[in-house]
Amino acid sequence: MSIQNWARLGLLIVAVAILVSGPYWASRGTMRLLIEVFYFLALAQLWNLLAGYSGLISVGQQAFVGLGGYAMFSLAMFAGVPILFALPLAGILTALIAWPTAFVAFRLSGPYFAIGTWVIAEVYRLVFAQIPALGGGSGISLPAGLVKAMASGRSARESLIYWIALAIMLVVVLGIWIVMRSRVGLSLSALRDNEEAAVSVGVRTRSLKFVIYIATAGMTGLIGALIFVQKLRITPEAAFSVTDWSVLVIFIVVIGGIGTLEGPILGCILFFVLREYLADLGAWYMIILGTISVVIMLVEPRGLWGLILRWRNITVFPVTRRK
Amino acid sequence: MTHLLEAKSLDAFYGDFQALFGVEFHVDQGESVALIGANGAGKTTFLKVLTGLLPVPGQSLSLEGVDLTALRIHQIAARGIAMSPEGRRLFPSLSVRENLQIGASVKRPGPWSLETVEKLFPILAEKANTPSTLLSGGQQQMVAIGRALMANPKLLLLDEVSLGLAPVIVRDIYETLPMIREQGTSVILVEQDIGQAVAVSDRLYCLQEGRISLEGKSSELGRDEISAAYFGRAREAS
């Protein structure tokens, strides 16, 4: 390995170590914020994989956040599955539901696909609002007994959720990095560059997109399950929120730099900094976010990471397969 | 005898617009066939049909007796038709070597590998890690041909190789054609430059307004005959 790669690995290990030890140095408020940063970053990287690398512009990933959350609550409340087991199961269930969903969504392409995914998410929201056992439109809380069974006390439970959120984020970021460095990544890059040319050289673009869609749905479901375990309460509005799970996620990816692994990380940092300072401004907060994304798209369509690349040609996650 | 590729009375449509009319076309094993014609005559359309980019359901088109019209694009690639498209269509975010590697997606066995392709075009080994966007036009064309060869095709389609390139570079590229054919690969080449097309092909087809207006051995066709077929009767009458 070159010195540069050792430095990169060292930096990564230090960063991970600092984050892993979070429960020992961070306040409750900071931990809660970091958990949110982790799942937003994971959601952003997953959407980036879908839209940035596979050309699947979905505006309906909230369908899978919500399905994961509701699957989690149902498994824990009705099937008596302990929450820690219900989390991965919720992810798997979401992936299973995403399968038939993909057949519907993949009938459409381009902007129609985007709108179609949104409509599908709305359908799921309306369906879950009709289920009395899950509290209908007003939602339901996770029974205290189930929550207490997770860990010995509140701070132990919060640390546990923190570590799970961190683990999911690391798996997503490093997983996508590994995929992009592999043969599949080569095909995905080709697909992103020019779909017609990719399919002409024999890349199985349709199957590839299908697999990516189902895999990201499953991971998104897992994240959704965790989000609502942390929140302890789920409602159709919150679970299938297009603002929280699509608009903000797209904002993060687009301002950071779509189609790169570094971009969503930068976007996530900017998003949370802005939110910490602007959240009190109410509607103005969203207006400012919107304005910032428009300006960034006009100045540098490759986002903040694109701005940095203009200044210096560096890479944090080298994905080119060079021998 | 079955031809390697055979189209019988082939029609092709873009929506309601008919682009090809009753095209009779064949290529035999190891043959080099040129396809010429004016802009809009249907040359690129015909190549799109062969690669499956323009589906022609219910038409008669076969490779080694296997019906191509029922196959999807990547299945056709896997059967052994590879194209170096007009305008190269390289993948800009990939390096030269990655552009070649992606060509091997169909995993067909055969003589062509990274090693042999880089031997055919030595400059590609030298520029292996260069982004494909930084290459000259001629080098990009070599990548496009190399990428197609990586699939070890039975039939190689070359669309407008000479477009926008200096004559000396065009000559360099066409000089590799015999080496490609030596490996048993058949070639269909679409060319604007009729002289070039005649020089490197065994047989020639001329398309005019979606119809085959001339077919024959390249060495036996006269220049007048070719121009008449190329420009059509309208030009003769005027």
Image (cartoon, rainbow, N blue to C red):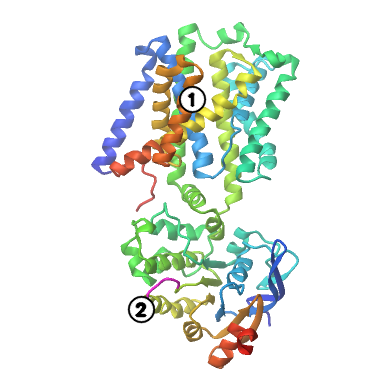
Look at mark 2 in the image and give the residue it sits on: B168
Q: Do the residues labelled 2 and 1 touch (CB within 8 Å)?
A: no
Q: In which quarter of the image is residue B72?
A: bottom right
Q: Which residue is drawn at 37% across and 17% down?
A: A22
Q: Which residue is farthest front?
A: B238
Estimate the x, y position of residue A223 in percent, counting from the top left.
54, 25
Please tell me whether residue B42 is drawn above or below residue A118 in the rendered image: below
To which chain does the residue with label 2 belong? B
Estimate the x, y position of residue A319 in percent, counting from the top left.
39, 45
Q: How far apart are marks 2 and 1 (CA)?
A: 58 Å
Question: Magenta residues, as a range?
Answer: B163-168
Discs 2, 1: same chain: no
Estimate the x, y position of residue B22 in percent, counting from the top left.
72, 76
Who is closer to the viewer here, B96 or B238? B238
Q: Which mark is residue A287?
A: 1
Name the amino acid type tagged 1. Answer: Ile
Name the amino acid type tagged 2. Answer: Val
Q: Quadrant of the N terminus of chain A?
A: top left
Q: Is mark 2 on a helix, strand or loop?
A: helix
Mark nearest the camera among 2 and 1 is 1
In the image, is A284 to the left or to the right of B209? left
